[in-house]
Each structure stands twice: as C-alpha cells, then as structure tokens.
Image (tube, helix red, strand yellow):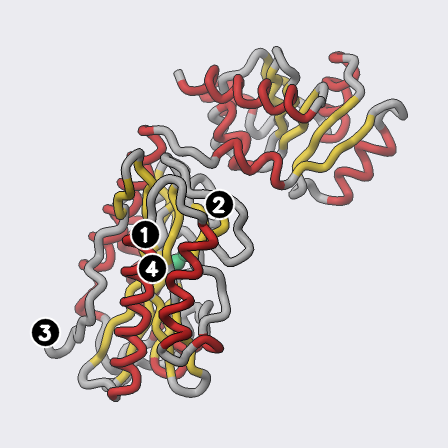
Amino acid sequence: MVYPQRRQKVANLLGALNLDALVLCQAENLRYLCGFSGSDGALVATADKLVFLTDSRYTTQAEAEVSADHICEYRTKVDGIIAQLQGFGVERVGFEASLAFGTFRDLQDKGDAVWQWRHLRDELQGLRLHKSAEEIRCIASAAELHVTALAEVEDLIRPGVREKDVALALEFALRRLGAEEKAFDTIVASGPRGALPHGVASDRVLAGGELVTIDFGCRLAGYHSDETVTLALGHVPEKLRSIFEVVLEAHDRALAAVAPGVALAELDRIARDHIKTCGYADYFGHGLGHGVGLEVHEAPTVSSRSQALAEAGMVFTIEPGIYLPGVGGVRIEDMVLVTADGHQTMTKIPKTFRNILLN
Ligand code: ZN
Ligand code: ZN
C-alpha cells in the first residue's frame, strides 16, 4: 500500500518543520495522501494520526476510498478542522498556501488563541515531487491516450475548420477513449494566434500556409499529460519554417541534457541560449517547463529562477517557444521523466517538422 509511505512523508515533514499538525484542503494533496478523489474535504495530520474530514455529500465515497485513521463528517469545514485540532491538543499548525484567505481567517478567529499558524508553500512541494512507479504508469497512460485522441481527429486539422472545432473534437475523443477530463483548456492557436502562448481555441478558421500549435493533454486516474505539437498546413513562409527549426533544436538540446544532478535552471539556459543565439531572445518569455502529476502544473518549475537539481523520479515538461506578434509562433513540448541514469521521454508524438497537407 502506498498510503503508509506517504503518511511517513507527512510525519517527516512535520518533524523537519517543527510543527505539531498539518491542515490540508487542496484536492490533489488529499488524493495523494489518503486516496480521496472527490473535490471537497480536509485532512488533519499529526505525526501519528491522519483524519479525513468531509461533508455528507462525500461520506459514502470517502468510506470506500480513503485510507485514514478516521473519517469524520462535518457541517462546516472550519468547525470540523478546529474540532480535530482541539482533540489533538496541538500548538504549531501548518497549512497550504492555497487555502482560501477567508477560510484561514475563520480558522484563526474561531480557533484557539494559542495556535500558531504557519503557511507553507515550497515546504509542501517536496511531497509529490518524486513519482513512484505506479504514478509514472498513470502519467504514461494519460500520454498514450492523448496520442490516440490526436490521431483520431487529425483529418479535421485542415484549412476551413475552426480552431474551436478541432479542440472540441479532440476533447470529445479524449473523453470517449477513457480520460476523466481534458488536462486544461485545449490550445489550438493558428496563424498569427500562434504568437499567443496561451491561445485557447477560438472561432478563427485555419488557413493554408500557416502553422497551428496544439497544446493539450488529459487526466487519467488523477494524473495529467501535457504535450504540444506545432504543425504546418501547406507551404509555410520560410520565416516560420526557420523559427520552427530553432525551437526544435532548443527543445532537443534541453531534452538531451536531462539527467539527475543537472540544475533545472541549466536546462532552461541551454534552450534559451540557442534561441538567443538565433536572434529570438525577446520572443521566448516563459520558463522552459513545469512538473506534471496530480496537477498539470506543479513542482518543479524549470526556469532561470529554479534552484533545484533534476532528481530521479521527477516528471516535468520541456517546452520552449518563439512567439512573433502579428506573424505566428511555435511551441514544442514533451514530458520527460528523470531516471537514475538519464531520462525517458514520456510523450510520444514525433516532433520533427510536419506538413500535414503535403505528407
Ligand atoms: Zn502544454
Ligand atoms: Zn506544459
């Protein structure tokens, strides 16, 4: 069973942070630590006790899937959490940075005056940072599923079709193939819209002679996939073809460098340096990548500000891009797993230049 090991991580964290208890409400943390797949609940953890709390909508579900010492039903979440903390007689309590401010104020106002609250951000990120073999399987399955979905809708990626219709068909295919949900709002950014790094599919109609960037993924058993391809529709201007090759080379170089012990900031630098050398430094504004797991964006961040080194078991994206306002853009994204002796690419769509009308 995975949950006793994960509980041990919480106990270790409490010890390292000199805290008596942890209050967790974020759905992904609940799922990770006790198996609850619903959307609303809380966990109160001490070094040797783990109590799951939820309301009557979820009690039956929790009894079927939660691994905890107790499952308690509350009328209000704040009162439920306070009752547990009082029962444990704790003083120093950590909570997630994502806790709603109003909920925190209520906990503070209604809770015991002696409680010292400590908000945790980076400290909690280590909890889900290293993926187990089972988690890696889930992520790989999600990535496999989304490849099939793209293949099914490929005939639709043609001039005359709206970006929205491509996105909708893709999302429908994902669900039909068994995904729980799309990983995020599918990005289909064609022509000049390719210059929008987060160009969620619009009413724009695809046209020949353009690039189209499709950034998508799905959720399966709680775990996400995330991949970006940029495809050409017919003959594209030389300028677009050349930025594609620059981005691909930046992507390939950074990906090739992924191994345990390599600084995540160094991976960002490798990709950015190539883009800079080719004269596009000003057109790659975002970081190189992000962790993927129960959240589609989670630790570690892969950017120039990253402090961490790559470690075996981390799963993150490599996704350089060049975005030329008014002209178009290219992004190429893969998910990579850091292994004991290097890396393994978890996303499988070929990334070399592909003209889907001429091939
Ligand atoms: Zn993506
Ligand atoms: Zn991504």
Q: Is disc 4 placed on a helix, strand or loop?
A: loop
Instruction: Name the residue beneath numbered marker 3.
Output: 359
How many neighbours does mark 3 have within 10 angstroms: few (below 14), some (14-19), or many (20 or more)? few
Q: Which residue is mark 1?
A: 257
Q: Nearer the viewer, mark 1 or mark 3?
A: 1
Of tags 4 and 3, the one toward the viewer is 4
Q: CA distance from mark 2 to mark 4?
A: 16 Å
The verdict on label 4 being within 8 Å of ligand 1 is yes
Name the residue at 49% across, 20% down: 66
Quadrant of residue 293 in the image?
top left
In the displayed structure, would residue 63 be above or below residue 40?
Answer: above
Chain-order first, disc 4 or disc 3: 4
Which of discs 1 and 2 lies nearer the camera? The answer is: 1
| Amino acid at pointer 3 | Asn
Towards the viewer: 210 or 285: 285
Please rate how many residues cluster around mark 1, counting C-alpha atoms within 10 Å: few if below 14, some from 14 to 19, many from 20. Answer: some
Residue behind mark 4: 333
Q: Identify residue for label 2.
A: 300
Nearer to us of marks 2 and 4 is: 2
Instruction: Specify the label residue 265 is tagged with.
Output: none
Alpha-carbon distance for marks 3 and 2?
A: 37 Å
Q: For this view, does 15 lie left or right of residue 218?
A: right
Label 3 vs 2, first from the N-terminus: 2
Judged from the image, the secondary structure of the residue bearing numbered disc 2 is strand
Q: Residue at x 59, y 18 (%)?
A: 11
How far apart marks 1 and 2 lie (CA) works out to 16 Å
